């Protein structure tokens, strides 16, 4: 068995997804004030070192990883981790834990690089990696149906990913002051696509 062998038994909480959920939760509880909002005292102390800062304005290389474990509020972390679990478990079971974990961090790092190249603001959140995972799910399970909330209709994963990518591109170009790192999301999509093609990852047999 090589280091990138798929998991042989399906798990709802495979190792990488499980521990990413746990560590994101730990960082959130340590750095964000649940009652009053904003950073905790520890969060204020760590933020200059862990938040992804603009080039030449506090940037440190490890911030390309540490920013993925920081979130602004409960809704921010909830939707990121919910998507990580829903879509990530399928990819980790298909690819194996080591490849999935490498994919997760490379898409997040790529998203961070794109963001600091196009923005002069600070960035936090796992959204870049989550968008990479969404792209991976759309490519590996293109005909799986995802239920939209508004309107509540099912749509194939491949169309959902394409629509979301165009939506993020539009917002990145037109809503530069929205406070959302749209280009980080696009970076996660692009890096995910490159990795899947570079690694020559294929759909499961039943989806060929």
Image: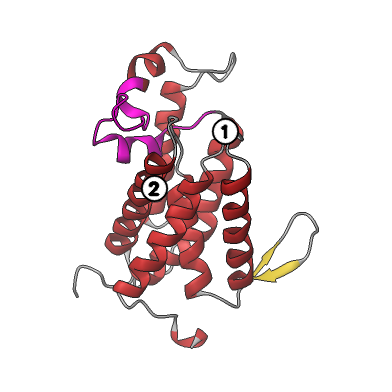
**Is residue 53 found inside the magenta-colored segment of the image?**
yes
Specify the farthest residue to the top.
Answer: 41
Q: Which residue is drawn at 43% across and 66% down?
A: 91
Residue 45 sits above or below residue 25 on the image: above
Q: Please state, as top left, top right, bottom left or bottom right, where the N terminus lies in the image.
A: bottom left
Q: Residue 114 carries which label?
A: 2
The mark tally for this picture is 2
Q: Is residue 180 left or right of residue 121?
A: right
Q: Give the residue at x 40% y 58%.
A: 14
SS at badge 1: loop
Quadrant housing residue 42: top left
Is most of the magenta stretch helix, strand or loop?
Answer: loop
In this view, the residue farthest toward the left is: 2
Find residue 61 and report its horizontal and vertical position in percent: 23, 36
The answer to whether 203 appears left or right of 61 in the picture is right
Quick one: which residue is furthest to the right in this view?
Answer: 151
Q: Where is residue 137 in the image (x, y as percent from the top left)?
A: 50, 67
Q: Mark 1 points at which residue?
A: 179
The reply to whether residue 12 is visible in this rendering is no
Q: Which of marks 2 and 1 is nearer the N terminus?
A: 2
| Residue 181 on image: x %, y % | 51, 41
**Any magenta on residue 50?**
yes
User: What is the span of residues highlighted in magenta in the rendered image?
Assistant: 48-72
Please, what secondary structure does the residue beneath circle 2 have?
A: helix
Instruction: Determine whether 174 is above or below 101 in the image.
Output: above
In-front residue for pair 183/139: 183
Q: Which mark is residue 117?
A: none
Q: Residue 79 is drawn in which quadrant? A: top right
Residue displayed at 50% across by 53% down: 85
- In the displayed structure, does residue 145 sit left or right of residue 27? right
Mark 1 crowdedness (10 Å alpha carbons): few <14, some 14-19, many ≥20? few
């Amino acid at each position: 068995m090589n280091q990138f062998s798929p998991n042989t038994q399906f798990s709802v909480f495979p190792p990488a997804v499980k521990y990413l959920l746990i560590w994101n939760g730990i960082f959130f509880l340590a750095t964000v004030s649940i009652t009053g909002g904003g950073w905790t005292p520890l969060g204020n102390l760590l933020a200059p070192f862990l938040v992804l800062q603009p080039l030449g304005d506090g940037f440190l290389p490890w911030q390309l990883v540490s920013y993925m474990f920081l979130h602004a509020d409960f809704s921010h972390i909830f939707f990121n981790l919910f998507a990580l679990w829903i879509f990530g478990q399928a990819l980790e079971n298909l690819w194996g834990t080591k490849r999935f974990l490498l994919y997760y961090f490379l898409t997040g790092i790529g998203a961070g690089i794109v963001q600091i190249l196009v923005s002069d603001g600070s960035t936090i959140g796992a959204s870049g990696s989550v968008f990479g995972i969404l792209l991976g799910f759309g490519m590996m399970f293109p005909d799986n149906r995802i239920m939209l909330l508004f309107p509540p209709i099912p749509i194939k994963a491949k169309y959902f990913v394409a629509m979301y990518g165009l939506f993020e591109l539009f917002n990145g170009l037109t809503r530069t002051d929205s406070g959302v790192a749209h280009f980080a999301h696009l970076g996660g999509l692009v890096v995910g696509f490159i990795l899947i093609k570079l690694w020559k990852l294929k759909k499961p047999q039943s989806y060929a």
